[in-house]
Image: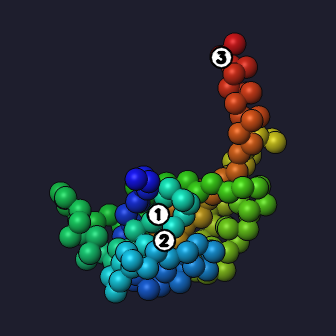
């Protein structure tokens, strides 16, 4: 049995959310997509479950109302990219499809690079690239 992490996020409109994420190049998992939900595969092991606010509220255990990601940040979803240029490309695609670039960049030389964007519903994503071999070497050097 494969293990997949599903990150559930509230959205105003599941169809609009689907168009946004497909515009970024992600695929839709049709078997978990309906009128009020859209399932987007981020990686082989991670999917977004985008639920309209009413549906999200019916899943949430409470207490209180569903948070508004335009008002506060409750989760940061990191999205791995294979190369540094892909980080810039996905942020540019997000802006072109109705999202926004937060302007935040994390640069760690030739080891790691990341940026940040928000989808049209205000949910925050951090696409990033890392040279895992250089990161392991750097971490090993700190331990030594």
SS at mark 3 in the image? helix
Name the residue that disc number 1 marks: 47
Name the residue that disc number 2 marks: 40
Q: Give the residue at x 58% y 57%.
A: 79
Relative to 1, residue 136 above or below: above
Name the residue that disc number 3 marks: 143
How many neighbours does mark 1 have within 10 angstroms: few (below 14), some (14-19), or many (20 or more)?
many
Relative to 90, residue 126 above or below: above
Which tag, 2 or 3, sits closer to the chain's start? 2
Q: Give the residue at x 68% y 57%.
A: 81
Label 3–label 1 contact, CB within 8 A: no
Q: CA distance from mark 2 to mark 1?
A: 5 Å
Label 2–label 1 contact, CB within 8 A: yes
Task: Judge left or right: residue 25 versus residue 44.
Answer: right
Task: Judge left or right: residue 143 versus residue 65.
Answer: right
Q: Give the residue at x 58% y 72%.
A: 26
How many neighbours does mark 2 have within 10 angstroms: few (below 14), some (14-19), or many (20 or more)?
many
Instruction: Indicate which disc residue 80 carries.
Output: none
Q: CA distance from mark 2 to mark 3?
A: 38 Å
């Amino acid at each position: 049995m494969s293990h997949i992490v599903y990150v559930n996020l509230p959205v105003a409109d599941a169809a609009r959310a689907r168009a946004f994420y497909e515009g970024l190049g992600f695929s839709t998992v049709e078997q978990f997509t309906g009128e009020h939900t859209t399932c987007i595969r981020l990686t082989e092991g991670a999917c977004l479950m985008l639920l309209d606010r009413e549906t999200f509220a019916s899943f949430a255990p409470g207490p209180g109302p569903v948070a508004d990601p335009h008002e506060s940040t409750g989760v940061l979803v990191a999205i791995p990219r294979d190369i540094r240029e892909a980080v810039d490309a996905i942020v540019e695609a997000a802006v072109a499809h109705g999202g926004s670039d937060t302007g935040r960049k994390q640069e760690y030389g030739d080891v790691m690079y990341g940026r940040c964007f928000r989808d049209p519903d205000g949910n925050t994503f951090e696409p990033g690239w890392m040279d895992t071999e250089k990161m392991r070497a750097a971490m090993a050097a700190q331990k030594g």
